[in-house]
Image (tube, rainbow, N blue to C red):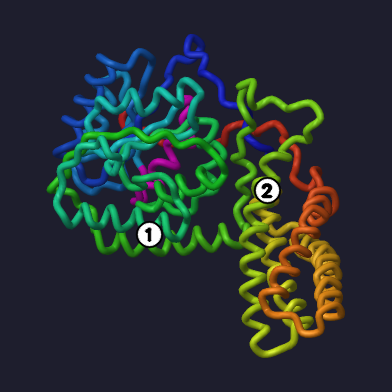
Amino acid sequence: MGSLPPREHLRLGQIETVLDVVVPVYNEETDLEPCVRRLHDHLTRTFPYGFRITIADNASTDRTPEVAARLDDAIDEVTAVRLEQKGRGRALRTVWSHSEAPVLAYMDVDLSTDLNALLPLVAPLISGHSDLAIGSRLARSSRVVRGPRREFISRAYNLILRGSLAARFSDAQCGFKAVRGDVAERLLPMIEDSGWFFDTEMLVLAERAGLRIHEVPVDWVDDPDSTVHIVRTATDDLKGVWRVGRALATGGLPLDRLARPFGDDPRDRELSGVPGGLARQLVGFCVVGALSTLLYLGLYSLFRLGVGPQLSNACALLVSAIVNTAANRRLTFGVRGRDRAVRHQAQGLVVFAIGLVLTSGSLAALDAATGRPSHGTELAVLVAANLAATVLRFLLLRAWVFPEPDRGEPVSPTGPPSGSVSPIGS
């Protein structure tokens, strides 16, 4: 399974149902009917294309299945699906995996989010501008009514995601999201969680793969009767953060399946005489190189407290070389997973040996010329020697360690997953 094709504007005239809005419910016999009727009325008045509302019953034990079946019979655009296991993520994965609509969305049954944000949410997906879209309660222009405890938990969770998973989206848990169908086809099988962490995992994987996430500021009013168990949900979310962070750190996720090529903007076209990706690789190499140099100098100064300059240089350069190869492998040249990781490190050590010869030779020449140089002079000579080795290192990494074929060629995506879901009612 290769990378995704370029995004395109949906050919709406050829699609009967453009949008499928899923409403996951568990024991919502009171709120379900007014929610669905209000949502249906809003879509009928404001959404210019065909739509469907899918009620995903998460093993309810009250009269929710009866209400869902009645709505299924009464409204043509409403479909009810029954799942025998609980879990919001499980409900979304099940319905989205079997939906043929090109745009998939979901919202909470309490309709805490103002429905006027629904069309702005899905419009970038229809136009081909974005891959996913989320409602954000933490955007500057959002208007939110909720208690201080929920506000604190939401912002604290957002900080945890930014600090641990380097997330850049602002609101992972707002129950108001949408995704393109072709993206969901690739993304859903990679998501392990079937509960509340499903949203976060989906967004983190999409963002790490370079997909475009559109954020819509929303007006949101807290539901005081919400049945969400905050402590248990927070604990499960932290476990999910640890699991996803570990998988990303070890390269165990095939994120290349979600990669998008550039669009048709003339600025994205290849320039004559410039190899593809060279500019981006140069920027990544320079950033990694600068950080590796700081690490190298810090380690050299640390080792120098106990041993001589040659041994300090060799140890510092060895450690920084291993880190540098791993960082360039992932960030500069986009090689993911564990395939050939040992080989790449071995080749990186050969490049390290070249750098060792240059820097050690520079130290030996300095010692022969001055006798006992100062620590500052040693550092200055080492910086100059590393700069001289940098160009050669980049060329060797690009042409020998991580050549273009190693980074893979896109192939045609596969078709949608097979399977069926049992409907409720008629």
According to the image, label 2 marks what residue?
Answer: 334
Q: Amino acid at mark 2?
A: Gly
Residue drawn where x is 30% and y is 36% of the image = 107
Q: Relative to the observer, which residue lies in front, 81 or 274?
A: 274
Q: Earlier in the sequence, mark 2 or mark 1?
A: 1
Quadrant in which residue 271 is drawn: top right
Image vertical order of residue 290 relative to residue 307, above or below: above
Q: Say whether residue 330 is left or right of residue 243.
A: right
According to the image, label 1 marks what residue?
Answer: 160
Residue 211: image location, x then y, percent: 53, 38
Is any atom of residue 371 visible in this view?
yes
Residue drawn where x is 28% and y is 44% of the image = 138
Q: Say whether residue 180 is left or right of residue 58.
A: right
Is any atom of residue 426 visible in this view?
no
Dot 1 alpha-carbon crowd within 10 angstroms: few under 14, some 14 to 19, many 20 or more: some
Separation of marks 2 and 1 at Cα, in angstroms: 26 Å
Q: Secondary structure at mark 2?
A: loop
Residue 63: image location, x then y, percent: 19, 41
Q: Secondary structure at mark 1?
A: helix
Residue 332: image location, x then y, percent: 68, 50
Image vertical order of residue 131 relative to residue 255, above or below: above
The segment highlighted magenta reads: 83-102
Image vertical order of residue 192 relative to residue 364, above or below: above
Image vertical order of residue 235 relative to residue 59, above or below: below
Identity of the residue furthest to the bottom in this view: 306
Mark 1 and mark 2 in contact (Cβ < 8 Å)? no
Q: Say whether residue 284 is left or right of residue 406.
A: left
Dot 2 alpha-carbon crowd within 10 angstroms: few under 14, some 14 to 19, many 20 or more: some
Task: Tally the marks.
Answer: 2
Residue drawn where x is 79% and y is 53% of the image = 391
